[in-house]
Image: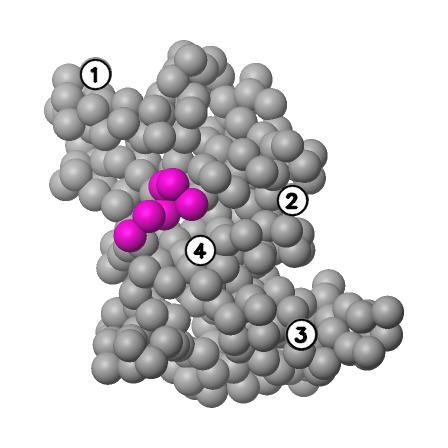
Amino acid sequence: MNDGQAGMTPALALDGVRKRFGQTEIIRGVDVAIAPGERHAVIGPNGAGKSTLFNLISGRFPASEGSIRLNGTDITRAQPFEINRMGLSRSFQVTNIFSRLSVFENLRCATLYALGYRYSFWHRLSRLRDAAERAEDILQRIGLTARRSVPASLLTYAEQRALEIGITIAGGADVILLDEPTAGMSRSESDHAVELIRRVTEGKTLVMVEHDMNVVFGLADRISVLVYGQIIATDVPERIRGNAAVQEAYLGTPADEGDR
């Protein structure tokens, strides 16, 4: 956390978090605090435990030890839907959308709980003006207004990822987790996605797992490097880039070799 944020309650804080599957320990004592409004990237080699860490934060897996707090509230044992209702939303590595619904319908569904609508037989979706207005606003923000009525299955891959980001923010969560949001994209698609992510997460706390270092260094305020289930460094991008331990563990080359 920056010095000016030292007195703030972190938007997300992990303290001594561990996760074991049987005798195998995947996450081995993670400590990190992420300030409100910070854009924070988690990087590391394949198999480092990044997706497992996201699953712990979002409640898909229970932590074996340690605590996880969202805006000061302990969510370590909370269910995923409870965590979402407390203001945390996430995307997944594999696109997770309703393929037979239109782009607009996907977004409208994602707004309902935040607007106070629960399961009922007497609410007709077509009459929920506030849900429609929020969905239209998100359509514009993610650049898919022209694709409003298209079934989600017919979108390009990059458009589907943009839609999933729209779904992730539709509920109004103030902490957003994005799991490899630009995976599989071309350079131009990735550049567009970076601008989209920057725009739609303005004023929110963003935590992302990402392999593309151009994306990481273009978006993140701070970076945590996860190697074999442990964070070996957390710092601003400039210092992470020059960190010898990070270069050796993550890039596989000592710092002096990488500079040649």
Q: CA distance from mark 4 to mark 2?
A: 15 Å
Check if mark 4's residue and mark 2's residue have beta carbons within 8 Å: no
Residue in view at x 26 percent, y 45 percent? 172
Q: Which residue is mark 1?
A: 126
- Going from N to C along the chain, the mark reached first, 3 or 4, is 4
Give the secondary structure at mark 2: loop
Structural crowding at the residue carrying mark 3, measured as other residues with C-alpha within 10 Å and reported as few (<14), some (14–19) or many (≥20) = some
Q: CA distance from mark 1 to mark 3?
A: 54 Å
Magenta segment, which residues?
A: 198-203
Residue in view at x 15 percent, y 17 percent? 127
Label placed on residue 87 = none
Label placed on residue 183 = 2
Check if mark 1's residue and mark 3's residue have beta carbons within 8 Å: no
Check if mark 1's residue and mark 2's residue have beta carbons within 8 Å: no
In the image shown, does 156 or 80 lie closer to the viewer? 156
Tag count: 4
Nearer the observer: mark 2 or 3; the answer is 3
Residue in view at x 45 percent, y 37 percent? 196
- Going from N to C along the chain, the mark reached first, 4 or 1, is 1
At label 3, which amino acid type do we have? Gly
Drawn side of residue 43 relative to residue 15, left or right: right
- Going from N to C along the chain, the mark reached first, 1 or 2, is 1
Nearer the observer: mark 3 or 4; the answer is 3
Label placed on residue 177 = 4
Structural crowding at the residue carrying mark 4, measured as other residues with C-alpha within 10 Å and reported as few (<14), some (14–19) or many (≥20) = many
- Going from N to C along the chain, the mark reached first, 2 or 3, is 2
Drawn side of residue 110 relative to residue 221, left or right: left
- Where is residue 189 drawn, in percent x and y? 61, 32
- Where is residue 1 drawn, in percent x and y? 38, 77
For residue 115, above or below residue 202: above
